[in-house]
Amino acid sequence: MRGLLLLAQDQSIVLADGSVAPIDVVTNSVVEPDLLVPVGEVVFHDPSLFDRFLRIALSPPAALFFLVAALAVSAFEFYAAGVGVAAAVSVVLLFLGGYGLSILPTRWWAVSLVVGSTLAFFVDFQQMRPTWRSVLGTVGFFLGGMLLIVEKPGLEMPWWGVALSFLALVSWVVFAMTTVVRARFSTPTIGREHLVGRSAVAVTEFDPNGEIQIDGARWRATSARAAALSPGDPVLITRVVGVVLEVDPAE
């Protein structure tokens, strides 16, 4: 309630007779609790179901969580083989997160820092190995999360809220997205341990990542050499890293 009163400071309400009255929040933590002092009679109405739905995003931890969840589910959509269910869920999550951040006293540069840090994890996921981007992403995520909201009495971002969103993001990348990628790009009839040393054909451009085809199956691959690979170029599989094959141009 204290946080809602502070958000109502300097706002206006419409009275029963149609006139507009200002809201003044009086804070006195010693003598009496916070008081909402309108000018005139106030009539309270039950919020609609939609308004109640929006209220779940009005706390700083919830707004941060919905924002990060929207980005995570959006990235998931690129790898899932479904019909866009993940995309629809990400739109709802992004709407909730955006609504909460638009109402709360938000530092938008901190929002950009959180978004950039989250995307850094997905770039490393695409590379299938952690790099300096993951380190900077972790630092940037916690920095942006803790400074996301302009703190006021009774309205602040708790450290556990940032930690919860971060753990949810890491768990999503490590478990959910990895499982989907393995299910989509791996081929049960081909043992990955037997692929090293075999020849294949590039089916996409490499920069340095792309896809190859071997025995009728397509695999994600990366080229360790600087030489560019084009569709149709023969390649040699030199190493298997998770679900990604490392290849070199065939001599």
Image (tube, rainbow, N blue to C red):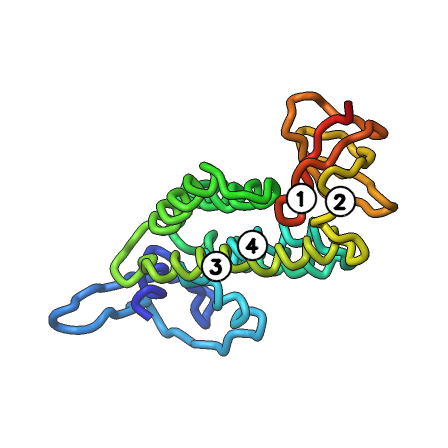
Q: Does residue 6 appear anywhere in the picture?
A: yes
Q: Number of callouts in the render? A: 4
Which SS class for mark 1?
strand
Q: Position of residue 123 (x, y in %)?
A: 57, 40
Q: Position of residue 218 (x, y in %)?
A: 80, 45
Which of the two labelled residues, at mark 4 and mark 1, occupies the earlier sequence position? 4
Closest to the observer, 133 or 159: 133
Q: Quadrant of the N terminus?
A: bottom left
The answer for how far apart the CA atoms under marks 2 and 4 are is: 20 Å
Q: Label 4 near label 3: C-beta < 8 Å?
A: no
The answer for how far apart the CA atoms under marks 2 and 3 are is: 33 Å
Which residue lies at the image location 35% right of the left edge and 62% below the top edge? Answer: 160
Q: Does residue 22 appear anywhere in the picture?
A: no
Find disc 1 in the rendering and name its residue.
244
The answer for how far apart the CA atoms under marks 1 and 2 are is: 7 Å
Residue 111 in the figure: left or right of residue 41: right
The answer for how far apart the CA atoms under marks 3 and 4 are is: 15 Å
Is the residue marked by circle 4 packed among few (<14), some (14-19), or many (20+) residues within 10 Å?
some
